[in-house]
Amino acid sequence: MENVQVKDKTFSIFLTEEQIKARVQEMATKINKDLAGKRPLFMAVLNGSFIFAADLIRQIDIPCDITFVRMASYIGTQSTGRVKELIGLNEVIEGRTVVVLEDIIDTGLTMRELVSILKAKHPAEIRIASLVVKPDSLKVELDINYHCFDIPNKFIVGYGLDYDGEGRNLPAIYAVV
Ligand code: 5GP
């Protein structure tokens, strides 16, 4: 499929299933090598990362654990406005190697907040693995250890990523026309 319609917008093919599969496999190979003997805890950030996490984890061949969390936005009582809260973390991460799995890093603000919440729980180390990064939109310094694709500042859907709740089921990634 070259073009898809999601709600009111038309999207065109941007990353094919084959391209995604190859890059996810390369990321897994690197992680298998880097983290052998560390029993990493993979922490997939829902909702967007569910397909990426499922594909990546099946290529991980070292002992590991996986957990799923969510960053929920709410309007804070302070003047800072929007605050994000980490939901769903039941594991003790003290002393562990945590690999955060994200679908996309845009401004990087969500990831910075998540990393700061996790650091307070004293993991041995935190590694960031994102399927996609938009380097031109990054607003904060982030040490992104692994990523599959750098993309320009375009809005994308598919492979877990949604547009207003739809499009997550598309097997490839599409960019807004
Ligand atoms: P950040 O805090 O890095 O600006 O935002 C990250 C979040 O914004 C992602 O987890 C995702 O939910 C959303 N996001 C940013 N860019 C895109 C995009 O191109 N497509 C979709 N579907 N979501 C995006």
Image: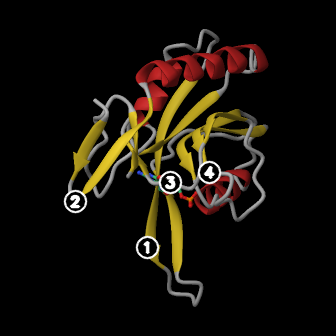
Q: Amino acid at mark 1?
A: Tyr
Q: Position of residue 73 (x, y in %)?
A: 45, 67
Residue at point 55%, 17% (across, down): 22
According to the image, label 1 marks what residue? 74
Q: Position of residue 60 (x, y in %)?
A: 58, 14
Q: Quadrant of residue 158?
A: top left
The residues bearing labels 2 and 4 have C-alpha atoms spaced at a distance of 24 Å
**Disc 3 Cβ-to-ligand 1 distance below 8 Å:** yes
Q: Residues within 10 Å of mark 3 (few under 14, many from 20)?
A: few
The residue tagged with tag 3: helix, strand or loop? loop
Which of the two marks, 1 or 3, is nearer to us in this view? Answer: 3
Mark linked to residue 8: 2
The residues bearing labels 4 and 3 have C-alpha atoms spaced at a distance of 8 Å
Outermost residue toward the bottom in this view:
79
Q: Amino acid at mark 4?
A: Lys
Q: Amino acid at mark 2?
A: Asp
The residues bearing labels 2 and 3 have C-alpha atoms spaced at a distance of 16 Å
The residue tagged with tag 4: helix, strand or loop? loop
Q: Mark 3 or mark 4, which is nearer the start of the sequence?
A: 4
Q: On the rendered structure, is 59 left or right of 157?
A: right
Outermost residue toward the top in this view:
61
Comparing 28 with 159, the one in front is 159
Q: Position of residue 75 (x, y in %)?
A: 45, 79
**Disc 4 Cβ-to-ligand 1 distance below 8 Å:** yes
Q: Is residue 18 above or below residue 122?
A: above
Mark 4 and mark 3 residues within 8 Å of each other at the beta carbon: no
The residue tagged with tag 1: helix, strand or loop? strand
Q: Mark 4 or mark 2, which is nearer the start of the sequence?
A: 2
The residue tagged with tag 2: helix, strand or loop? loop
According to the image, label 4 marks what residue? 134
Q: Mark 3 or mark 1, which is nearer the start of the sequence?
A: 1
According to the image, label 3 marks what residue? 154
